[in-house]
Each structure stands twice: as C-alpha cells, then as structure tokens.
Image: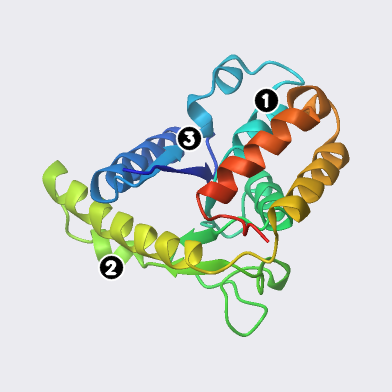
Amino acid sequence: MEKFNVYFAGGLFDHKELAGNLHLTLAIEKVAPQYHIVLPQNSASNAARAIGEIRDRDFEMLFGADCLLANFDGTELDSGSVVEFCIAKMLDLPTVLLRTDFRDKCDNGCDPWNLMCSGYPRTKNCLINAMLLFCGVKDLSAVADREETIARQVASSLDEMRAVPSRLTREHAFSVYRDTRDAIGNLMPEIFPDDRLRELVSVKTAHGIYTEK
C-alpha cells in the first residue's frame, strides 16, 4: 500500500498535548493505514531541546510530508503551528485544520479563529465538538472509540484534499521549495541542497501531490 506522510502540527508542551497527539496519531494510522503520521514530538531534536536545531528539523519533516494536519484548538492558536501552516500553504500541501475545541472565537463570520488563517486552497476544516463526543466517557475502550471517530473524519478530509489538483507542476514546485528553503534560512539550505529538493518533489509528484505538467 502506498503511504502518505502527514506532518502533525500542534502544541507539544504538556501532558495533555503530548498524550493527545499520540493517541490521535495511533488512531489515524489504525483506521487509515494509507497515512503515516509524522509527529514532531518524536524528533530527537525536540526531546533534546537543542538550541538552533529544533526549528530547522521540524521544517525538514514538514518539507518531507505529503500533507499537513494542524491542530487549531485553543482560544489562541499555537503560534508554531500557524507558522508551519503558512509554510505548508506556500508549498501547496493538502491540509486539514482540526479543531475539537467547542469555544467559538470567530472574527470572520465563519471559522472559529482569526480570519488570516482562513480561505486557503487545498485546505479543509474538520470541526468536532470534543465535549459532546467525550461527555460521560469513563473507560479507556470508550476513549479509544471516540479517538477513532475523530481519526476517521480526519482521514476522510485528508483523502478529499489529496484529490484536489495542485496548482504546482513538478518544475514549479521545485522553484517554490527552493525559494521557501532560502526564505527560512539558517540550516535549511544545507539540509536541502538542490539535488535533494528535486528528488523530494519527484517523489511527491509520483504520489500525486503535484502535477507532472
């Protein structure tokens, strides 16, 4: 089976975030084995908190992904996740914005977040009320069942966004990756020399993420 790498952007600073990220990752890979979830918290650079390395290694994983899943929970969105979302949109990656937070902080008449994070191509909102889903749940098997409910909706949304044709051809995508790499700066030009970028874009084109012509 062909596997698609999905970068999971989200907060990873406390037990609830770390455990929640992991539970959802395992649930998605169980119900949708076509997806491999790339979880930044599992990166050695994040565990070591190496100064100057964390950002670039996370961007390296994002560059290597076929799709983006971004957690948009909270009264204020996680700033790192928003940056990663913006980079993913520059690269025209199929994207799912997941919000399980039932609080509505809406300033654009539609989405429960800042309007600057709305309206992008190949992007689908996956809005789930976690309070309704988990209210009354008292055992781990029921928790796992609810996690799989979320996972199925995420996987369906990822399938839908992958089916949307990219605006980028292989050659255009290479140029965009090169320009984005240089704009990010720091270690990224060393991590991704042009040859590696060309190979990366070729693989993604074979996966249907970008068009041949």
Front-most of residues 129 and 154: 154
Q: Are marks 2 and 3 in contact (CB under 8 Å)?
A: no
44 over 145 or under it: above or below: above
Give the residue at mark 1: 54
* First along the sequence among labels 2 and 1: 1
Which quadrant is the N terminus positioned in? Answer: top left
- Where residue 75 appears, x then y in whole percent? 58, 60
Front-most of residues 7 and 102: 7
Q: Depth-wise, is mark 2 or mark 3 nearer the camera?
A: 3
Front-most of residues 159 and 149: 159
Alpha-carbon neighbours of circle 3 within 10 Å: few (<14), some, or many (≥20)? some
* Amino acid type, callout 3: Leu
Residue at 64%, 70% (x, y): give it: 121
* Amino acid type, callout 2: Leu
Gap between marks 2 and 1, in whole Å? 36 Å
- Where residue 175 appears, x then y in whole percent? 81, 48
Gap between marks 2 and 3, in whole Å? 26 Å
* First along the sequence among labels 1 and 3: 3
Q: Depth-wise, is mark 2 or mark 1 nearer the camera?
A: 1
Give the residue at mark 3: 39
* Amino acid type, callout 1: Ile
- Where residue 150 appears, x then y in whole percent? 31, 58
Q: Tell me how many marks there are.
A: 3
* First along the sequence among labels 2 and 3: 3
Q: Quadrant of residue 190?
A: top right
> Could you tell me which secondary element the residue under label 1 belongs to?
helix
Give the residue at mark 2: 132
Answer left or right for 197 relative to 204: right
Which quadrant is the C terminus positioned in? Answer: bottom right
